[in-house]
Amino acid sequence: MNKKTVMVGAVVIFLAGSILGNFAIKMFKQPPEPSEATQSLIGSPAPTFHLKALDGVREDSSQWLGKIQVINFWGTWCPPCKEEIPTLIDVQERYADRGVQIIGISVQDKLSAVKRYAQDNGINYVLLDGDNDGIDLATQLGNDLGILPYTVLLDRDGRIAYVKYGLISLKTLESEINKLI
């Protein structure tokens, strides 16, 4: 192989990487709106689930019926997931007495990492170990793109009221919760 071929190959690889990297950054910062299939789930009952809490006790989702549930799928390795955790902590603190329950479902994390992250960051809401069951649940709740974070709001009857790919802002979360209170 000559030097010119190697140089052209390197330039092509660099340009392809730049284009793909730029696309990934845009997708990461501005995830798409939920698909029609996901939007069609609005108003339908959410599936029940049984996942382990950080203490190893299996929790049944039916215990939160009657509350507005904010189900947030996240990972300790996910920058936008970590960015929105202070918002979730704040909302749990301010809306708990109004019947709102934040439920964080960690996916693809070691339980020890989740426990450490929760303790280090003062997470005040329910955390569940989703693992592969969490990924399946996120898909059942409309996350057909596998984007994290992914947030689903359930009304007091356990029906899907709102879904959001990517980072959810305090303004949006409060607006959607207030529609359900």
Image: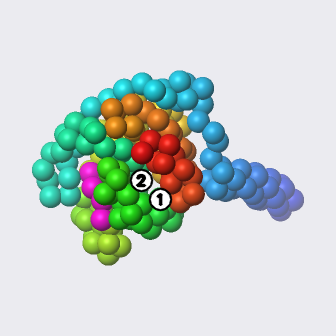
The residue labelled by disc 1 is 81
Q: Is residue 106 left or right of residue 38?
A: left
Q: Alpha-carbon neighbours of circle 2 within 10 Å: few (<14), some, or many (≥20)?
A: many
Residue 66, image quadrant: top left
Q: Position of residue 156 (x, y in %)?
A: 34, 37
Q: Is residue 142 above or below residue 92?
A: above
Residue at the (55%, 45%) spot, across then down:
165
Q: Is residue 109 visible?
A: no
Q: Is residue 113 left or right of residue 56?
A: right
Residue at the (39%, 38%) spot, across then down:
154
**Label annotation for residue 74:** 2
Q: Are marks 2 and 1 in contact (CB under 8 Å)?
A: yes
Q: In front: 92, or 81?
A: 92
Residue range of the region highlighted in magenta in the rendering: 124-128
Q: Is residue 43 above or below residue 134?
A: above
Residue at the (22%, 36%) spot, across then down:
62
Q: Is residue 57 above or below residue 140?
A: below
Identify residue type, mark 2: Trp
Identify residue type, mark 1: Cys
Q: Position of residue 116 (x, y in %)?
A: 28, 70
Q: Alpha-carbon neighbours of circle 1 within 10 Å: few (<14), some, or many (≥20)?
A: many
Residue 125 lies in the magenta-colored region: yes
Q: Position of residue 167 (x, y in %)?
A: 55, 55
